[in-house]
Image: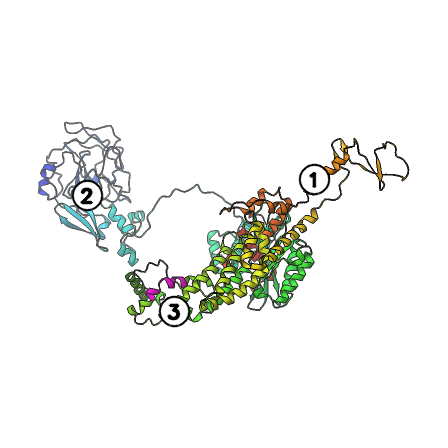
Amino acid sequence: MACPDPAKHGKMKTENFYKLHLVIWDAPSSMETDTTIVSEVDTTIIPQTDTTHVLETEAAILPETDAAILPETDAAILPETDATIIPETEHAIIPETDHATIPETDHATIPETEHAIIPETDHAIIPESDDAVIPETDMDFIPDSDMAIVPATPATPLDNEQAGSETQPNKRRRKKSIVWEHFTVETVGPGHTRACCKQCKKSFAYITGSKLAGTSHLKRHIALGICPVSRQRNQLLLPYTTPGSKSASAYGSATDPPKRRYRTAPAIANVPLDQERCSLEIAKMIIMHEYPLHIVEHPGFIDFVRTLNPHYNMVSFNTVQGDCVAIYLREKQRLLNLISTIPGRVNLTLDLRTSNQNLGYVFLTGHFIDSDWKVHRHILNVVMVPYPDSDHAFNQAVVACLSDWNLEGRLFTLTVDQSVSSEAVIANLRGLTSVKNPHLLNSQILIGSCYAHLLSGLAQDALGSMADTIKKIRDSVKYVRTSEAHEEKFDELKQQLQVPSTKDLLIDDQTRWDTTYHMLVAACELKEVFACFDASDPDYKLTPSMDDWKQVETLCSYLKILFDAANILTGPTYPTASTFFHEVSKLHLDLAHAATSQDPFVSNLIKPLQEKFDKYWRGCCLILAVAVVMDPRFKMKLVEFSFSRIFGEDAETWIRIVDDGIHDLFLDYFAPVLPLPEAPMENGTESIIKTELPDEGMPQEGVSHEELQHDGTVISFGDGLSDFDVYISEISSGQQTKSELDQYLEESLLPRVQDFDLLGWWKLNNLKYPILSKMAADVLSIPISTVDPDSVFDTQSMKIDSYRSSLRPVTLEALVCAKNWLQSGSSETSSAFVKAEV
């Protein structure tokens, strides 16, 4: 059959007609013939002619034959015969390329390839080859048979000759790809055709000039769910082929997720299930996240674990409770070992929490510095007290803690919140410390108030004095924040007024006073917007007056002082006691100055706060002063400077109290290490030898005229210079009477560096001040606050929820303490643990 004239088709020009092409014949439709038949021959022979050159390639193997012989003609034509049927297949692998374009004509011409005419069917496999580039067509299916491989040969020109009597009818080829069920073809210009999605109406390139874009990108648009309309409707798209066909199973449906290949690590085969390890991890999960122990009996959790590993036997409530207690006992033993190695003593804080049943739970937290000069803070006990209002409730908890951790004689200070304890409770604790530690300044080292609770109380008093004004501002903020329309109007008005504030309005949490402070600060910066907001929104009737805003700004200036003071306690590491002397003294001066202000509003606001803070200052200034003396950058100099500003004419008295107190405290550490009278001392060839006379009045053999008897003792003077040695010894002993504390205080101050490592300095000077360093470790670890960093700004006391109060006291203590120890990283977690009987 002769090659059709390209001039008869609108999409190709005669001058651009390809000299190298492959003529693809249209296969007969299913109405015309049953099958496409390839003649059965032994070999494929492509003769070398003037127009055909064959390179070395693999033989073209046709199904059900050893080889296929192509008849010798001007163009290699596969005739229609009745020999071999090419069955249906699942795949059509058509490599995508830009090297060839198939114009839509009666006979598709492929440039730069062999001049072989292959009858067009729905089932032809053309493999990918380095030498032959096959363009993308609409033939999307692979015959279910041996692949017919067309060898790649050099392209040869074909003349427009008649192909013979077997010419197929001249008709337009039918599009067979399933994508055309979802796309339509639209002509947008001469030689420019685009495919348009029927659902989202998005168009894609299809034919541009002589280039055919193919259908792969159209398939991806449908199969991967890229089409937004299809994704919104959440409907299943039609499969690429009819249900039940092989092609459908191979391609999958249009909604199937794309099949991607991932690089994965080699799987670990036959990993045995460690039942004990899994049970341990469940117990740790319950401890760390405060899940209820009954979670192991919840059906949802059981199903989840079985999904992970169906062979795991879920533990019972009693078993997981025993595992939690076992973890607690293991970590407790490690902490006991750590405390036994510390060179100094332990400080305790007591915090009382209550339940809905009015049961008290005393949380006792230990603070100490280890031998490596690292600060530790661990919850040691949670003691349930049935009568928290009793005057001896805390005594019971302290005695239990000292006994449990072997701290008798090693307790240094107690910090108790006076807001939850009466004067009688403090007095009973003071008597207890005097019995347990009689040598510690006659039990004077006891702090009767928590610094965090003190600051929270002062902030609440200040906020309470302006409750009406603060409520008006809170309601204004709520009006804006709880409506998107109001918030849009507010932001638009803010832009019009060009208010430079970058803060966002927020509704405060009235259980945390810092959120109220931040709400007021943000509102004050936007007061101009609030003042004009009623003009933009007639429904807004809550506009605070200018006097209200002025008073709130004054309040915020003093709340900032309290906020900065409390913010020190929220850091990742607990600060040393020396940090607080300057902060507390500075806060004392600020409040005292404000209380005497000429502004009646300021003086009335601050005076009650100053009186309460002054009471706290007089109760803890001794401890804070001793702590700051242990800082080589300040020593007694900062105490003298601060006291002169605070106490005025009485400063000398208070400075003397601090100096006497720190020396008395040093003697408590120095006394246990005083040396006993030594044995006879030798110093080179010279010696002072004391010898008891066996019998008074009897001359001893070997005693010269230089020997002198005194009180039954013979003193030998050697060469007569022994009196000089005595003189030198007396001078030396007089010089050594200066203690480590005095030597430390007389040395010059270190320069004040912002990143100064105080504990690191004492670690380096441990050998220089062996006794004073022990005292410094105990003093610097004194806790000023009894609450956790997360609860510094709380306005309400902590509560024990109903679930935890229903647990046995030993179980509750195990859960609380184990969580604290695991989070602090005081000990490494091990997979081995001891089973406990509960």
Left or right position of 780 against 669: left
Mark 2: secondary structure: strand
Amino acid type, mark 1 = Ser
Mark 1: secondary structure: helix
Which label sits in the foreground, 3 or 1? 1
The crowding category of the residue bearing disc 3, from other C-alpha atoms within 10 Å (few below 14, some 14 to 19, many at least 20), is: few
- State if disc 2 and disc 1 touch (CB < 8 Å): no
Which label sits in the foreground, 3 or 2? 3
Residue 526 on the magenta segment: yes
Find the residue positioned furthest to the front: 649
Spatial separation of the CA atoms under disc 3 and disc 2: 77 Å
In the rendered image, which residue does mark 2 sit on?
A: 212
Q: In the rendered structure, which segment of residues is drawn in magenta?
A: 519-530
> Is 34 or 281 nearer to us in this picture?
281
Report whether residue 2 is seen: no
In the rendered image, which residue does mark 1 sit on?
A: 732
Above or below, 608 against 679 in this view is below
